[in-house]
Image (cartoon, rainbow, N blue to C red):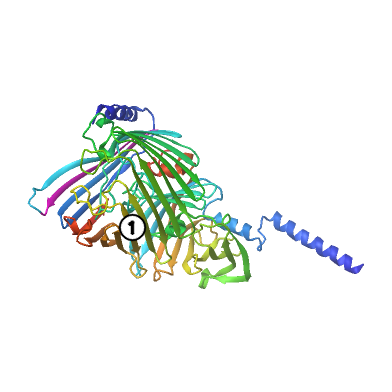
């Protein structure tokens, strides 16, 4: 009888804890999908049509700027995005990503060409790095260990370690080790692995406010395959933008869409 | 420009300029300055591109100013060329265009059986500016498909001297996406060469591998460099691209060109060493230790006469400036087409400054 009472009390306690968590709007720290959804909101609201202006700087070993590139990324719901290269050295190049299918248009040839996921990694900045602003729809995984400490000195904070595997083929990095802030679940840093399970890049995220972050302002990528090449990806602006369906057709890439028209 | 192209171009341009209240979305002109030093000539070039947008109407132009200094006794040339000048209308799923425009089709790299409008010359050394063809075009885009109808060279209608890419022709392409597979159906009706039908496909097999193929059956073709009808012919290509994790890419292609002269036939000035059976490989590599550099090696082999053309190249890309160097040489048995080419060693050094 005592045992039954204890079981009932335990169940009631567990239900009350869940209810309190829900009322407080908090995410259970073992619900990886919910944690990823929280983390995504610091870069872009999931399933939102957006136009993101992005600046990419490739740094030399001494920290000076080697190359600077500008991209317009048009994100549409359903894993669809169009990347338009805006810098003079790449002007006219476009990459279309529809789920696991990718096309590239080079201005010299004016025809869309099918490319493989590996070809997305070529060039000064990997298109996958520029156009990927969410994890929750593409990855599943588990929490590793208990609460950890991330960062050093005054910036150190408690964090959660997630080990993620891609749920679809065609994802630039099939495995990601991701560390999120323990309180707000903002992404702090990540280890990105390519198909051969080699560590390709290490990412660190920079926020608008150090104390109460609301938005990722930049991502710094240290390339582990190219002798520590450092790439800074800065999100200059984000605004809602629904683009015509025709723009998501690969054969449309040969045209020059008027970007500023609402 | 011929009235057949001029009238629709002017109409679309007038609509573009006169559309009241439409929001303008003009992009700043862009372009490129180039210097090229080659074994056959030296050249300075300036390419300028610009767009003007008014609501659904758009005007696109690209021009090239160049000064060419041949290495032989020919006089130097200074010229200005209009590469593209076309007006277009964006009517939702329908897109219309008129004027001079680059329209490239098909799936191959070194050779394209179904590039029936642009008919671009592939495997050229150094940077090349494509010059568009005069055309009228209507396209319809739907979710996973697109249909394009092009009347190319309407200005050469009735011109018996128009050959190859200059022939007046109607061309159709229907594109359909089936997951990882792109399918293209092509049809062309040339004023003199009559009908041809083609099919092309590209398929991404896994994270690193892409396979492609293209085939076209012609009812007639022009015998190279002559006015004679070469009769029916088949063009076919199969190829793959593979990309490795160390930023290396490999392209392998094999093709059958039924319009090329058979093995051991006399070399004409127009055949350019073409042979019916061809195998091509190209490898590019961006070394981890020097990511600004892209190195390449390529080879075209003719199994019929065992002639070959080999090339190597290097591109150095800074923030804006890029420098490209390429060498190519041709050889083989004495009776092979490659060994009998008038120019068997060529090279180019090119500087590019985009703005």
Q: Residue at x 40, y 63 (%)?
A: A231
- Nearer to the camera, B167 or B3: B167
Look at mark 1 in the image and give the residue it sits on: B279
Image side of residue A170 versus residue A184, left or right: left
Q: Chain of mark 1?
A: B
Q: Is residue B53 magenta?
A: yes
Q: Position of residue A136 (x, y in %)?
A: 58, 56
Image side of residue A135 versus residue B8, left or right: right
Q: Position of residue B48 (x, y in %)?
A: 25, 44
Q: Position of residue B285 (x, y in %)?
A: 35, 64
Q: Position of residue B250 (x, y in %)?
A: 38, 61
Q: Residue at x 37, y 53 (%)?
A: A70
- Residue B139: quadrant of the picture: top left
Image side of residue B69 versus residue B281, left or right: left
Question: Which span of residues is magenta-colored?
Answer: B52-71
Image side of residue B65 versus residue A253, left or right: left
* Tally of marks: 1
Disc 1, SS? strand
Residue B42 is at least partly visible in this image: yes
């Amino acid at each position: 009888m005592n045992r039954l009472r204890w079981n009932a009390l335990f169940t009631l306690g567990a239900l009350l804890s869940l209810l309190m968590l829900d009322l407080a709007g908090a995410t259970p720290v073992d619900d990886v999908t919910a944690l990823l959804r929280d983390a995504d909101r610091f870069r872009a609201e999931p399933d939102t049509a957006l136009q993101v202006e992005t600046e990419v700087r490739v740094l030399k070993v001494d920290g000076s700027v080697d190359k600077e590139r500008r991209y317009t990324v048009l994100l549409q719901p359903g894993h669809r995005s169009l990347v338009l290269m805006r810098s003079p050295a790449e002007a006219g190049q476009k990459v279309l990503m529809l789920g696991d299918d990718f096309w590239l248009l080079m201005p010299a040839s004016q025809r869309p060409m099918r490319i493989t996921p590996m070809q997305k990694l070529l060039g000064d900045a990997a298109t996958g790095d520029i156009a990927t602003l969410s994890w929750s729809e593409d990855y599943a995984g588990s929490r590793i260990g208990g609460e950890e400490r991330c960062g050093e000195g005054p910036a150190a904070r408690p964090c959660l370690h997630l080990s993620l595997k891609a749920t679809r083929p065609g994802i630039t990095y099939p495995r990601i080790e991701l560390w999120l802030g323990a309180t707000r679940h903002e992404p702090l840093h990540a280890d990105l692995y390519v198909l051969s399970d080699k560590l390709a890049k290490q990412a660190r995220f920079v926020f608008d406010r150090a104390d109460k972050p609301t938005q990722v302002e930049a991502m710094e990528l240290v390339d582990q395959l190219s002798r520590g090449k450092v790439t800074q990806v800065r999100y200059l602006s984000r605004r809602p933008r629904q683009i015509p369906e025709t723009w998501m057709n690969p054969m449309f890439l040969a045209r020059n869409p008027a970007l500023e028209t609402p | 420009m011929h009235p057949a192209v001029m009238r629709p171009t002017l109409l679309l341009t007038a609509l573009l300029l006169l559309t009241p209240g439409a929001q303008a979305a003009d992009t700043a002109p862009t372009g490129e300055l180039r210097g090229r030093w080659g074994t056959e000539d030296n050249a300075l070039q300036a390419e300028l591109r610009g767009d003007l947008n008014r609501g659904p109407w758009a005007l696109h132009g690209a021009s090239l100013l160049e000064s060419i200094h041949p290495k032989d006794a020919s006089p130097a040339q200074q010229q200005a060329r209009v590469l593209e000048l076309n007006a277009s209308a964006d009517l939702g799923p329908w897109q219309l265009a008129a004027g001079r425009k680059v329209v490239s089709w098909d799936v191959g790299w070194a050779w394209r059986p179904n590039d029936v409008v642009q008919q671009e010359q592939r495997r050229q050394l150094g940077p090349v500016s494509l010059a568009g063809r005069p055309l009228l075009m209507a396209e319809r885009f739907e979710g996973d498909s697109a249909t394009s109808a092009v009347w190319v060279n309407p200005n050469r209608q009735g011109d018996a001297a128009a050959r190859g890419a200059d022939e007046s022709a109607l061309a159709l392409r229907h594109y359909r996406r089936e997951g990882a597979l792109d399918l293209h159906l092509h049809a062309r009706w040339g004023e003199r060469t009559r009908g041809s039908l083609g099919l092309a496909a590209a398929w991404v097999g896994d994270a690193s591998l892409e396979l492609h193929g293209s085939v076209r059956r012609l009812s007639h073709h022009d015998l190279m460099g002559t006015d004679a009808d070469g009769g029916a012919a088949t063009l076919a290509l199969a190829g793959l691209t593979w990309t490795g994790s160390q930023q290396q890419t490999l392209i392998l292609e094999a093709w059958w060109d039924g319009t090329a002269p058979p093995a051991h036939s006399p070399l004409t000035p127009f055949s350019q060493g073409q042979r019916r059976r061809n195998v091509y490989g190209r490898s590019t590599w961006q070394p981890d230790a020097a990511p600004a550099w892209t190195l390449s090696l390529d080879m075209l082999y003719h199994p019929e006469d065992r002639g070959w053309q080999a090339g190597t190249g290097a591109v150095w890309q800074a923030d804006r400036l890029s420098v490209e160097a390429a060498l190519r040489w041709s050889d083989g048995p004495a009776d092979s087409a490659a060994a009998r080419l008038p120019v068997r060693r060529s090279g180019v050094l090119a500087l590019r400054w985009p703005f």
